[in-house]
Amino acid sequence: MSAPKHGEIDPISGQGTTGHEWDGIKELNTPLPRWWLWTFYACILWSVGYWIVYPSFPLISGFAPGFAGYSSRGAVMAEIDSVRARRADAAAGLASASLTQIRNDPKMLEIALAQGKTAFGDNCAPCHGAGGAGAKGFPVLADDDWLWGNSLDEMAATITHGIRAATDDQTRSTMMPAFGKDGLLKRDEVAAVANHVRVLGQLEPEKGANLALGANLFSENCAVCHGAEGKGDRSLGAPNLTDAIWLYGSDVAAISATIHNPRNGVMPAWRDRLDPVTIKSLTLYVQSLGGGR
Amino acid sequence: MSNPAPAQSLWARHAKIETNSILLLIGILIAISFGGLIEIAPLFYLQSTVEKVEGMRPYTPLELAGRNIYVREGCYLCHSQMIRALRDEVERYGNYSLAAESMYDHPFQWGSKRNGPDLARIGEKYSDDWHLAHLNEPRALVPQSIMPSYAFLSRTPLEYRAMADHLRVLRTEGVPYSDEMIEQSLADVRTQVDPDSAGADAFLKRYPKAKLRKFDASHREITEAEALIAYLQMLGTLVDFKLYDNKANLR
């Protein structure tokens, strides 16, 4: 590039001027610093190399893929594969070991619990709370009260297939009927059963409640799942009504609402979202929170 | 520059552009439009822009109503729907988003800010009850949440009389809604929340893999919250990644 024709030389700085003049003040034609200019040229050269090596220009039916064969999707897939491989090494056979084997091996258990804790925070804590503290309608996992089986295998099945999960045909699918909504029990009968349930749970029934009717209706309608004494049945997910744990509240209105139109709580199936090692880790982590067997 | 006299270099001619603001403006526009042509125009004609996938279908009317509420409430201001091809995002949210997954989105909801988590694959990650309770009072379930309460959504009946028009507008934008879908759009809103209804089979034929259930079991009528939950529960669930070949669509 040829140097621009300078106008006159500014006597004070000795610098050429551009020839522009405003009110007697002339603009100096200060050249760009050499280091800046060469960096600029180097960047242009770099971009040419970049176009050749990396994906760049659109073509008629695709794009110039570049000689390095790079793609951001390919890169992330390779990275994740290598992370999984490294984890598999570090986890020392977590993938092939059974849940009981992992529990009995302190080194594997430590890794599983650490992995489980991380996965729990992102996937489970929104419903079950940090540390399995639970919330209204979402069971506490840090206690010894279980709606479904609490052996390692049963817990793994729950996490894998979920509970009443629409996306999994092996999900746990038993439902409590809507006794009030579907007209199986009348309004006063629902209230009577609710009061009887309070009695089962060692709570005071309402004054004037028809407890005899409630007990009768309970044994006819509820005992088949919840048991004659209301101790529940984990194979059906029927809660124990005699403990002091109430998922949706223990007052007559809350119990009546459940009998009228039960929530039949849903837990998603995780088999499509989490890999088998993560599900194993979660199983052991959740068991470590509460009283699994 | 072999022109002998008067000696006028290319540099000096360039001064004409630099000293005339209108010429400079036109020059800038021409330069930028070249960049735009090369970067944007090919996306419209290249077949490889949008991946070929199995399972994508237009939104059901109820999902579309929920999506309109999502846009109305500005959910995109805090939630993106775009899992980038980065390790931490893929590990947390699942497979990176495909262009095909938002091909029926007008406008798309990729978003540019995450005060909350990405929602591109939120579908079926949590239960309907969770979504309802969480919309009503986020802190009841996630104590550290900064999301506002949207309790009014479950108190507001869904207004969907103009559903057919919504579908028609989208059809002009290229979403393949059939005449039958437009005709049935009002009924389909009601069908989707009633799995036992007579139209359920025909509805599923129109919208394969659609989720038919009462999304808000605590309200008899269809609420805005219910439509929104129907939308959230289908996000990211249409493409079956067991069948999809990631390696065929490297970008």
Image: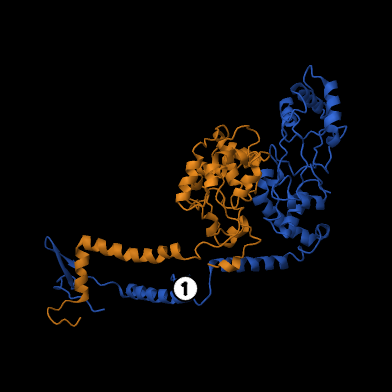
Instruction: Give me the residue at 68% from left, 54% from top.
Output: A119
| Chain letter, disc 1 residue | A
| Amino acid type shown at disc 1 | Ala
Residue A286 visible in this rendered orientation of the protein: yes
**In this view, A215 is above or below B184:** above
Q: Quadrant of residue B218?
A: top right
Observer-nearest residue: B87 or B122?
Answer: B122
Quarter the N terminus of chain B occupies = bottom left
Q: Is residue B16 left or right of residue B47?
A: left
Q: Quadrant of residue A2?
A: bottom left
For chain A, give the colour: blue
**In this view, A52 is above or below B96:** below
Observer-nearest residue: A138 or B222?
Answer: B222
Q: Residue furthest top?
A: A208
Q: Is residue B172 left or right of residue A243?
A: left
For chain B, give the colour: orange
Q: Quadrant of residue A209?
A: top right
Instruction: Give me the residue at 14% from left, 79% from top.
Output: B7
**In this view, B223 is above or below A80:** above
Residue A76: horizontal and vertical position, in percent?
58, 66
Q: Which residue is mark 1?
A: A64
Residue B185: horizontal and vertical position, in percent?
55, 42
Observer-nearest residue: B96 or A61?
Answer: A61
Residue A30: horizontal and vertical position, in percent?
23, 70
